[in-house]
Image: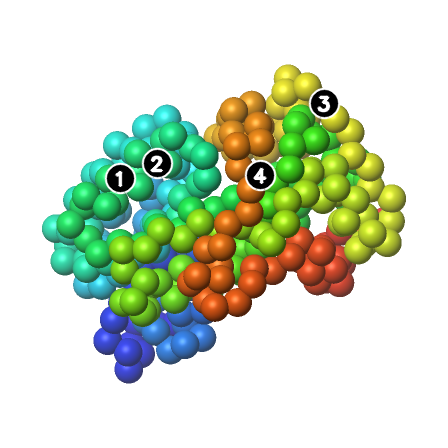
Amino acid sequence: MPENSNDQQLFLVTGGTGKTGSRVAALLEGAGHRVRLGSRTAPIPFDWTDRATWAPALTGVDAVYLAYQPDLAVPGAPDVVRVFTAAAVAAGVRSVVLLSGRGEPEALECERIVRDSGLSWTIVRCSFFAQNFSEGAFLPDVLAGAVALPNGDVPEPFVHADDIAEVAAAALTDPRHAGELYELTGPRALTFAEAVGEIAGAAGREIGFVPVRRTEFVAALAEYQVPDDVISLLDYLFGTILDGRNSATADGVRRALGREARDFRDYAEATAATGIWTPTA
């Protein structure tokens, strides 16, 4: 949406073309708000690796959706978040909504930085995204009919990206969410093997789950030409975070939105209906 809406607030959505950022931007634009996409290809470019782009992107902004790429768990993320939040304060930004991850020590450090930044803040701490099976690194495996992952027996309460976006958009536009930490999960935990089984049922085709060692997993990602930073992140998550520490469900969606979180089965059925999991001839 052009930045000439009747609404006077301007929202910067970093990761504006990503799984959650694109959804947050769409919700804000649909409600008539002014949105500036934080993306390298945006009219006012924003690049986490080029700090010279930050000040122009922050100019005139009232609130920021802070979705650091590739993830708060990567080395150096706290330093980047510290400098960025300071730049936001200097630019006159008033509030920030931080996308965070469950059970990640580096993410917790970033949360502390945001809380101490002087900005009004809301933290949206999330479990593993369901959309990683349809918009992320696991899609090629699903299409190939065999998802090969380590830790396939560890339960994870996958969260729907639409739920994340709705909570974030509410936090950006409603001051009653200021100072809140919302831990977002789905309503039940499934192992990765069970999640693949639900995808297979929804897609109406055979999709197997293959347990593999981490080294085999990393090699397969490289074969599919997954970017190196994403490979490193997934290797870290499966080797460190996906050990059962995050298996419990949380009530963040209900607390923020007054409704239950979307179930993985609903995600699988709706996604299957789009045809994205149907291999092309």
CA gap between label 4 and label 3 equals: 20 Å
Nearer to me, 62 or 171: 171
**What residue is pinned by disc 1?**
112
Apparent side of residue 11 relative to residue 142 in the rendered image (left or right)? left
Q: Position of residue 240 (x, y in %)?
A: 52, 24
**What residue is pinned by disc 3?**
212
CA gap between label 4 and label 2 equals: 18 Å
Q: Position of residue 183 (x, y in %)?
A: 44, 49
Element class at badge 4:
loop
Q: Give the residue displayed 29% in from the left and 67% down from the top.
A: 176
Q: Amino acid at mark 4?
A: Ser
CA gap between label 1 and label 3 equals: 36 Å
Element class at badge 3:
loop
Quarter of the picture containing the N terminus is bottom left
- First in residue order: circle 4 vs circle 2: 2
Nearer to me, 85 or 192: 192
Q: Quadrant of residue 231?
A: top right
CA gap between label 2 and label 3 equals: 29 Å
- First in residue order: circle 4 vs circle 1: 1
- First in residue order: circle 2 vs circle 3: 2
Neighbours of disc 1 within 10 Å: few (<14), some (14-19), many (20+): few
**What residue is pinned by disc 2?**
108
Q: Which mark is residue 247?
A: 4
CA gap between label 4 and label 1 equals: 23 Å
Look at the numbered discs 1 and 2 and tell me whether their residues touch, using CB distance below 8 Å. yes
> Is residue 58 among the parts visible in the rendering?
yes
